[in-house]
Image (cartoon, rainbow, N blue to C red):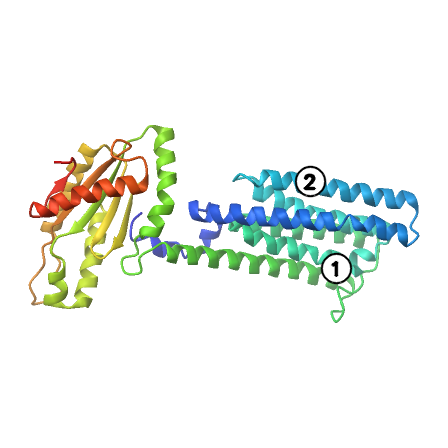
């Protein structure tokens, strides 16, 4: 990941982008939460047939209610089983189910008494619950698609009832809306609910991005690296690609702070990060894990990684950092330790440990060198 990519993540199009590994993990957890709540509500709904029977409702109606509730329980249990494993399609399917179920409830109420589709504020409010729950999926596409489905379905239902000449009533106590104006108000509330849920998702994305990135350079940090690496391993394993982890430390960096001041040191780190980012391919990553230490994840064998780092070492010397006009420039060098996956380690901690050991050998030998093997 390049340092310049962080700022672009604030564009509205980020909502429509597929979530990254961290957001997918949050979304999977949210999907399981929604599935449990959905099952709990359907279990509680098993009491509705008893209420209907005790109120003197005809037995066919009681049996119909019982069948509907049992069916809803079965589907809710199915969704819960599916949610035990992350599935890309599941949030879209379950949010569509939740919204469509509300539409079916309103349609059934309309068959009994068309005005209930308007007066049934409690049933209609379930749209808002279904849309709000999409935010737990941590995917802007799910929220926007669920909200759009609610608007379309309720719009069609309202249009059918309006075409049949059924008079609309109040949305809820305190909001009086008659005629087409009441239908438009409900549609507007659905749009606002969707926008609010989408804003929550975007805020979640921003917080995750901030927590996983270094505030000074804009690069990913150690937390991001630890969360990302299992996915990197899985991708390399499936594709048979080579993978090399590089632990890199800038030599004698403290002299910048001592001679030019902390602010110049910050600018120097950004200069170094920008220079190193230029050597990365699109699927490679650079992270700052502390001070003047960086980690590179390169999709190439250790030998090729050594050659690329050697070119980078020369490039840094050729591009010295100038703190201020009239001051002396700083030409940086670095020491690095390389660890090849899976030969030198099959896990993130294993690779970091191996690379750190080789980095210490490079430092002990005087720095400004790259070590790819244990001495």
Which percent across, then down, holds residue 196?
56, 60
Specify the quadrant of the image occupied by residue 264.
Answer: bottom left
Circle number at residue 122? 1
Q: Nearer the viewer, residue 128 or 360?
A: 360
Is 92 displayed left or right of 184 in the figure?
Answer: left
Q: Residue at x 51, y 48 (%)?
A: 27
Q: Earlier in the sequence, mark 2 or mark 1?
A: 2
Looking at the rendered structure, the secondary structure element under dot 2 is helix
Is 14 displayed left or right of 78 in the figure?
Answer: left
Specify the quadrant of the image occupied by residue 352.
Answer: top left
Q: Which class describes the residues within 10 Å of circle 1: few (<14), some (14-19), or many (20+)?
A: few
Q: Which class describes the residues within 10 Å of circle 2: few (<14), some (14-19), or many (20+)?
A: some
Q: Nearer the viewer, residue 157 or 117?
A: 117
Q: Nearer the viewer, residue 163 or 225?
A: 225
Which percent across, then down, holds residue 275?
20, 50
* Residue 324, visible in the rendered structure: no
Up the image or down, 36 lies above or below 195; here it is above
What residue would you read off at disc 2?
75
Q: How much space separates mark 2 and mark 1, taking CA atoms?
A: 22 Å
């Amino acid at each position: 990941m390049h340092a310049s990519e962080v700022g672009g993540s604030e564009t509205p199009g980020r909502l429509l982008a597929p979530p990254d590994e961290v957001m997918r993990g949050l979304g999977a957890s949210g999907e399981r939460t929604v599935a449990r709540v959905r099952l709990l509500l359907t279990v509680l709904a098993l009491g509705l047939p008893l209420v209907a029977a005790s109120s003197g409702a005809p037995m066919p109606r009681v049996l119909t209610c019982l069948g509907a509730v049992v069916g809803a329980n079965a589907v809710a249990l199915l969704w819960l089983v599916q949610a035990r494993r992350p599935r890309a399609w599941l949030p879209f399917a379950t949010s569509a189910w939740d919204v469509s179920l509300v539409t079916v409830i309103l349609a059934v109420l309309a068959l009994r008494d068309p005005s209930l589709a308007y007066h049934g504020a409690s049933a209609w409010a379930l749209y808002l619950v279904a849309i709000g729950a999409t935010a737990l999926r941590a995917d802007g596409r799910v929220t926007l698609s669920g909200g759009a489905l609610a608007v379309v379905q309720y719009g069609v239902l309202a249009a059918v009832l309006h075409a049949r000449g059924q008079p609309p009533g109040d949305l809820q106590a305190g909001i009086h809306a008659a005629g087409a104006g009441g239908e438009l108000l409900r549609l507007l509330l659905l749009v606002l609910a969707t926008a609010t849920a989408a804003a929550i998702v975007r805020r979640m994305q921003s917080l995750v991005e901030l927590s996983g990135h270094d505030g000074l350079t804009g690069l990913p940090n150690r937390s991001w690296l630890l969360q990302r690496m299992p996915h990197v391993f899985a991708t390399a394993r499936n594709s048979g690609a080579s993978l090399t982890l590089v632990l890199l430390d800038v030599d004698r960096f403290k002299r910048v702070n001592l001679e030019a001041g902390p602010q110049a040191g910050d600018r120097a780190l950004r200069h170094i990060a920008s220079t190193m980012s230029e050597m990365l391919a699109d699927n490679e990553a650079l992270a700052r894990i502390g001070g003047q230490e960086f980690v590179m994840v390169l999709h190439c064998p250790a030998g090729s990684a050594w050659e690329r780092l050697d070119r980078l070492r020369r490039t840094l010397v050729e591009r010295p950092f100038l703190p201020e006009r009239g001051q002396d420039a700083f030409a940086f060098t670095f020491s690095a330790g390389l660890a090849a996956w899976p030969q030198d380690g099959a896990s993130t901690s294993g690779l970091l440990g191996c690379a750190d050991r080789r980095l210490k050998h490079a430092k002990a030998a005087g720095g400004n060198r790259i070590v790819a093997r244990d001495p």
